[in-house]
Structures are given as structure tokens and as C-alpha cells.
Image (tube, rainbow, N blue to C red):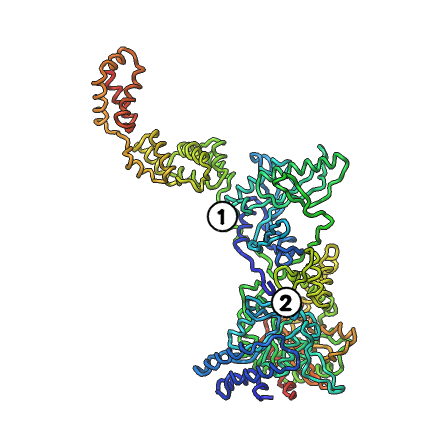
Amino acid sequence: MNELRRLTITEMHDGLRRRDFSAVELVETHVNAVENEQLNAFVTKTPEIAIKAAKIADEYFLKQKDNISPLMGIPVGVKDLFCTKGIKTTACSKMLENFVPTYESTVSNVLLKSGAAMLGKLNMDEFAMGSANTNSYFGPVKNVWIRKSDGEKVVPGGSSGGSAASVAGFLCAGALGSDTGGSVRQPAAYCGVVGIKPTYGRCSRFGMIAFASSLDQAGVITRSVSDSALMLEIICGYDEKDSTSSKRTVPKFSSFINGDIKGKRIGIPKEYKMDGISDEIVHNWEKVSSNLKENGAEVVDITLPHTKYAIPVYYLICSAETSSNLARYDGVRYGFRVDADTLEEMYSLTRAEGFGKEVKRRILIGSYALSSGHYNEYYEKAQCIRALIRNDFIKAFEKIDYILVPSAPTEAFGLNEKPDPLIMCINDVFTVPASLAGLPAISVPVGLSNAGLPLALQVIGNYYDEAGILNMASVIEQNCGRIVNSLT
Amino acid sequence: MPGTLPVLNYSCIEQAICTGLAISAEINKCSYFDRKNYFYPDLPQGYQITQFFEPIVKNGKVFINNNEKEIRIARIHLEQDAGKSIHEESKTYIDLNRAGVALMEIVSEPDLRSSAEAAEFMKKLRQILRYIGSCDGDMEKGSLRCDANVSVRPKGSSTFGTRCEIKNLNSIRYIVQAIDYEAQRQIKILESGGEISQDTLLFDVTLGKTKVMRSKEDSSDYRYFPEPDLLPVEINQDKIDSIKSSLPELPDQKKLRYIEELGINEYDADVITSDKEIADYFEKLAKKHDSKIAVTWLTVELFGRLNKTNIDIVSSPIKADALSELLDFIVDGTISAKLGKQVFDIMFETGKPASLIIEEQDLKQITDRGQIAEVIDTIINSNQDKVQEYKSGKTKLYGFFVGEVMKLTKGKASPDVVNSILNEKLSN
């Protein structure tokens, strides 16, 4: 592997500034790697766009040395959920197989404007629904990590499976993902890389194909914590095109990473110590906690009493919003259509063939939860409990600064195995509560399992404290090392 | 389109508040939006953003029948308009140009008792909307549309019958026709022992009949839920107060003021306030001129010509300022009232200002006593026989002398001056 691919964004930027290598060199080696990639991480490849950005970047670096965006000339990938003007955007659904947007998502727009070189669009679960990237119309993504015990391939997690796999596979230095119930954090955990989702409203949802509007939030996946800070601080900010985006000023997250966590109070919620978590994860959780204590933090037990309702509440709300958000895919104006004699028939056949199983399942659940006679029983109740879950966190944050929990209950499971239904059910249990509350959270790798697969922990912070969780994660990264570097 | 998001148009919020205040309604300080989910080709998102649970305006009232009857307004909510489906024999076309544009839905309580009241109500509502400027009220262009719910019940019954909703009526005439037809249809069904099914109807204007668009059985479950893409609309009292203070004078207030302060009779006050454009025109005239003169010139002279040529006041060839100038000339005696009407006609035809016409046609009134006395002397001298007859009692001949003066001065002699000199000379 070309050594340039192994660099972090920070290292790439330094190399470019020193003219150790050119942006074209850097991007070309990535373009070649993407061209031959075996992970099925990319669904659309855009080498010309990447090279063009690299050439522009080189001009910048020739002209000046300072005040250049840290992402200038950096090879990145974009989850295929973000609309990219003139470039096919499919949400990995048959429904949008040939959809080419005429507009650019705000987040990808600011990323590309900062000079990043987009290598292509990344595979994902259809409309971001899934936790293994096995629901993509374009086939599953493979994890770079192989289970040593039996040599089996494992899933990269989902729904941003292509984003996590491409970063872990050194195909790009960073990737845009989206996180509705853990879709950035869980695949980052399974692939041994860093994934952060900011506070709900921190970045614009404009142009990001909607799955569950009240939960969807863009996020980034990188190989190091400081890289996440650099990439995240670029995509965050108010956008008049998204009424739910926040007007708060965005601090330069990267400048808050100083490794100092003295006196910070870290909460360990007792409700998260549940059946079904692997012993290895529990062990790492305890180990990291005591490391952080040695670094000067205080670790305290806390309670988040409504955690047990998070999964049902999440599935009700996200399915309800899905049933409405995906109604626009009806075959009338754009996208896939099955022609039929009547309008009704055209609708039914288009949606029956255009959507995959998981998407249809959620549309059905959501439609049911919103239907008259069931609204109060399901949707309204779910919203009430969501408020209770949010209050649990608000109360907890009165006494602590951060919450430390696993990112997922287990390591990645085999690509061809159907995991234990209980495990599948609690798979999202650690990521969903922060999504329901709209809190920022970061997944950071902490070690390898006996089977040689990545394990990760998650730091959840108070509203708008992205800088704080990034700093905490950087300390964990320091203590545990970057496991992704062990990949060859 | 995938990934696009709605953004609230705040001026629409202000229009809704303004309208709410104009009908003495409560302004909801925290309203929010909901999604109404249904599939239809002219609904590009598959849902309509509306306000189902918490509308922005509640509990208003509109008065009809000379302010004797109150019609309660349940709510005004803001929502997105859908596109337009144009059905032809074998094809349907979709026009999405108005899709997503904000509209106000004003919902009345079941207080209207006849098609005439419905028409009266619509006119009154339209008048108010036009006054405050929240809608141009143009029903033909679809900027004001009406869905009429109709039910019938036996005389004396206190419970309402099953209602049918007639969608998208686009003129007051059709509202009346549709309601009358529908009421008769329902009466026939009930009298023959049938039952009304709660349908959604369309009014076929060529046949003059209502027809079923959707029956209750296939009415969809709209699965309303709060719109997660928009924040709740929070309005503080200051905002309400500031809109209230900038609210223009409403038709009823204006009418009362005309009657009480300007001494205009009720009929004229009604005519002038019926349309804000007319009232504005009138007020420009009344600013400088006696209100009675203004009323006459507006309602008799201008309306007469506008009606004859079928032009509305907005496109009148004589604007208020121009008419006001003409009145100046009449009041200060530059021209006589009679010539004024002549000038008015030319103004109406050519659009030229009064001053120019008076100058071009040399119409300035002659008020110079000496000049008029000369003319009178000439007439007396050459008509000595008639002077003798007059002096011997044939006073009817007075008109003859005036006529002769006007003939010689081409009607420009000031009647007052003519009278005073002629009287003097003839009595000698």
C-alpha cells in the first residue's frame, strides 16, 4: 500500500504544506485504490472530480503556506445519502437508482468548498435503514477486518457501512456519514475508526435525503480523533435552508483538543450494563474508565432510568417519520416507476418493487403507528417517552460532564450469519438514546477482541459540547492507540 | 425532491395574524405545523404541511346582514397549496407551479343558513381580506377559493343533518348555485326516505350539478403528525400589538366614520366602503373637497362612466388626483360645473389632465364684470323689442337673455356674474 494512504488528515495537510508530495499525487494514489477496491464501499466513483480538486489544491499550496483549509486536497468520500449536484445520488435504493440531483447538499457543499477531493459516493443501507450495510440495493459492504478465529468476513456495520469501511480500508482519509440511531458511530466501532455525530441541529440537513427528520444528523468518520474535529468543524453551522439547524456559533473544535481532562466528571449509567454485552466490551469499558481516572477524571455511577424504552420509542418514531418522508417516491415525478393501467396500481407496483424489505417494513410500521385510532397509543406515547429519555440526560448532565458507554454491545458479526435475535434487538441500544435526545456522541476504538475485531466505546456529551467529547475521545485514543494502524 | 426541506415564509405568518386581528380572533402564541399524509399526483411530497392540532388563529367572527348576524370563525390555519391537476379526456396534466405556496384556510362554524347568507359571508370576508391586503380576493384566478359544506334538516330540528363538502368553488355565483342545487338534492333524497352519505363533491358548472368526487368509504386516513422539519411558530404580544397598530381601518369602521363624521348617507357609505379601492379613491377626493361633492362626482359621474364602459376603478382612466384637480377648477370658479362635466368626459376618453383640456379648448370661465357687461349691452341694444316686453311683465324672457350671453361667450360666462349684471340692466 502506498504510504500516503496511511496518513491522517493532519499528516496529509502537513505533507502538502511542506510539498513532501503534491495533492495530485496524494489523490491519484487514492483514486487508484478506489478503482480497484474490493469492499464494495463505493457505489459511484468520481475520479475526475477528485483529480480536479487536487490540481486546484496544488495551486493553493504553491501560492501560499498559511491559512489554507486543513481539508484542501484531502481525499474524502461522501455517503450516497447526500445529494451531489450532477452526480448520481441513490440512497442505495432501486427507487433512486438513476437519480441525479440538480442541487448540492449543504454539508457536502461546504466540505467540497473547503477543497476536499471527493473520490465518490459511498455505499450504505437503503435510505440509511440498517445496522450492517446488508440492506443496500448495490449489495453489502465488506469490513476490512477479518475474524481471525475462523477467517470469516464480517459486516462493517450500518448504515454508513461504506463510509466506515472506506476510511478503515485507507481508501479515503475521511468520509461523510449520517446518523439517525447510530449509523455513524456503530459502523465506526465495527471498523476500528472514529465516528462522531454532532448535536441535532449542528449541521444542515438540507440535501441529505430524509429518513427520520427529527433524528437525522450528518456526521463524519475518520481514522483519528483530531481528524474528526477538523472535518466536523467544517460541516457544522447554521443554514437558512434548514429551519431546524442551530444559529449557535461553531467553535473550532480542533483547538479544544489538549488532552486535559482533569476534574471532568464521567458518568457510567447503570442501565447500560445489560444482558447481551460481550465480556470483552465490559472489560474494555472498565479498563478505559480506570485509565481516565488516572488521567485526572472522576468516574461516577449515574442513572438514565428510561433507557429500556429507547429501542421501541426509536423504532416507532423513526418508522412514523419514514412513512411520511418516503411518500414522495411514488413514481410520478422522478425515480423508478412501474407503468400500470391505473394510478393506484402504478403507485403500488412502483413502491413494491422500488423499495427493499427493510424500508417497506418500516413504512408499514410507521403508517400503522400514525393511523387514526393508533396515534395516541403509539406515536404520541413514543413522543412522551422520548421527552422522558431526554430529561434523563438533562438531569444527568447537571452533575456530570460526559457519559461513557459502549458503542455497540458486541464486535461485528459475520457477513453471512444471522445473529441472535436478542443481540440484533439490542444492537442499537447504546447509540439510540443519544439520538433520541439529540446529543452529540463520538465512537472511539479501544482495542481488539480475541477474534481480532475492533471494539469501541462512546462518549456522549451535553448539547453543543462537541469540543468536549472530542477532547475526551482524544485522551481515550492516546491511552488505547489507533488500532486501525495494525491493518496492513 | 429528495433531501429538500421546507422553509417558513414569515410574511405569511404576519398576514395570518393580520387577518385574525381583523376578525377579532385569538392569535395563537405557539402554533405549529403538521403533516397531512396522502397520495395524489399533484402533491409532490406525499404530504401537505398544514396546521391541524394548533392553528395560528382561533375563534374569530364576521358579521353579515348589516351587522345583524354573527358568523363564528373556528380557525385560520396556514398550509401549503397542492399543485393543480388538469383532467382531459384520456390524460391528466399536473401543474406544480403553485405547489408549496402558502395559503390561509379560514374555517367558519356552521352558522350560515342559506346560499344567500353564504354569498353575503363570502363578500364580507373578501372585503375584509382586500382591506387588510392579505388576499386580492380574485376568485377567478384562484387566489380565493371556497369549499362549502352543505346539510339540510327539517324545520324546527335542532340537530344538523349529514353534510357534504363541495370543493373548490371559484365564484360567488357558483357558490350560490352549488349550495342551492345541493340542498335540493339532499331534500329530495331525505323526502324519498333515503340517507345522505357524507361525500366530497365537485360542482360541474356547465351542468349546474354537484357530483361525487370521493365517497366517505374511500376517504383516506391522513395520519397527521407534527412536522419535524419546521419549528413551532412562537409569536409574542409585542409582535401582535405592532401588527394590530398597523392594521388599516376596516370596512365597518370606515362606514361608520363616513356616516358620523362626514355626514354621508348610509347607502353611499355602503357603496364607497364596499371596496377598499373605491374608499381609497374617495378619501383622496375628500381630503381636499367637500365630502358631498366628492360623493356625487365619484358615485354619479365616475361610476356612471365606469359602468357603461365596464372598467373597474383600479383601471379608471381618471385617477383620484386628476379628478381632484378638476374639482379644484370647479370650486374656484375657473370653469362652471356644467363645463366641468364636459371636461370630465374628455378626461375619461383621453386621459388628459383637466388643466390641459381647459387650456386647449379655452374653457376658462369669464368672471370679468366689464367683459360680461359689454356682451350684455350688445344683446340689449340689438333686442330692444324683447327688453320692452320683459319690462312690461314678460319675465319668462329672462332665460332668453341668459341664453344669448352664453351663446356669445361659448358658455364660459360665469352664471353668477351674468345674473347679477343682467338683473341690474333689465331693472333700469
Using the rendered view, name the quadrant where residue A217 is placed.
bottom right
Residue B282 pos. (x, y %): 43, 38
Residue A473 pos. (x, y %): 62, 80
Q: Quadrant of the N terminus of chain B?
A: bottom right
Asked whether, in this view, residue A351 is left or right of residue A33, the answer is: right
Q: Are marks 2 and 1 on the same chain?
A: no
Along the line of sight, the residue nearer the viewer: A149 or B106: A149
Q: Disc 2 marks which amino acid? A: Leu
Report, in whole angstroms, how far the alpha carbon at label 2 lies from the one at label 1: 51 Å
Using the rendered view, name the quadrant where residue A326 is placed.
bottom right
Pointer 1: residues within 10 angstroms few (<14), some, or many (20+)? few
| Label 1: element kind | helix
**On screen, B342 above or below A269?**
above
Asked whether, in this view, residue A109 is left or right of residue B114, the answer is: left
Residue picked out by circle 2: A96
Residue B246 pos. (x, y %): 48, 48
Chain under numbered label 1: B
Residue B235 visible from this viewpoint: no
Residue picked out by circle 1: B245
Q: Disc 1 marks which amino acid? A: Ser
Q: Where residue B29 is drawn, which disc sits there?
A: none
Asked whether, in this view, residue B40 is left or right of residue B249, the answer is: right
